[in-house]
Image (spheres, grey):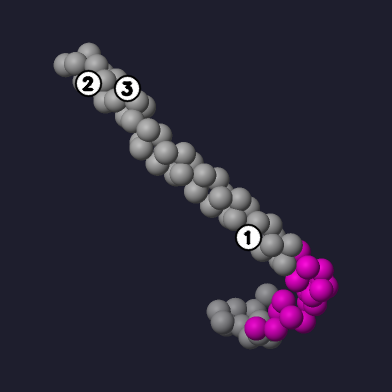
Amino acid sequence: MLWETMERVNKLRQQALADPEFIKAAKEHEDALKAMAKEEAIVRKKCLKAAQENKLNRGPKLLSDIYSESVFGANPTGEQH
């Protein structure tokens, strides 16, 4: 059964490779994938560059910003040390 399936798939593959229309479509598909990958790399590079510039422009975080939402002096458990 496996051998028959492999023979059938191989026969169909050979037929497809003999068809110029299939070859043309496959080449167009390959070119489209390459173009998409290139565009994606450009976008990823721009995003990374923007993130790095944003990080450089912000400077270091201030402790007052980090702890701005914290409440010091509140004792939720009621226990004393």
Question: 29 or 37: which is nearer to us?
Answer: 29
Q: Amino acid at mark 2?
A: Arg
What residue appears at the point 36 percent right and 27 percent down from the top-left corner?
Answer: 17
Marks 3 and 2, how far apart in space? 10 Å
Question: 34 or 50: which is nearer to us?
Answer: 34
| Residues under numbered marks 3 and 1 in contact, where contact means CB atoms less than 8 Å apart | no
Q: State the SS at label 2.
A: helix
Residue 9: mark in rendering: none
- Relative image position of residue 22 (x, y in whole percent): 36, 36
- Relative image position of residue 48 (x, y in whole percent): 69, 60
- Which residue, given by chain and number where applicable, does mark 2 sit on? 8
Does residue 53 appear left or right of residue 4 in this picture?
A: right
User: Vertically, is 15 above or below 31?
Assistant: above
User: Vertically, is 79 above or below 35?
Assistant: below
- Which residue, given by chain and number where applicable, does mark 3 sit on? 14
Q: State the SS at label 1.
A: helix
Q: Earlier in the sequence, mark 2 or mark 1?
A: 2
Write the start and end of the magenta stretch as one range.
52-69
Question: 27 or 53: which is nearer to us?
Answer: 27
| Crowd class of label 3 (few under 14; some 14 to 19; many from 20; radius 10 Å) | few
What residue appears at the point 74 percent right and 62 percent down from the top-left corner?
Answer: 49
Q: Is residue 58 part of the magenta span, yes or no?
A: yes
Marks 2 and 1, how far apart in space? 43 Å
Quadrant holding the N terminus: top left
| Crowd class of label 1 (few under 14; some 14 to 19; many from 20; radius 10 Å) | few
Residue 43: mark in rendering: 1
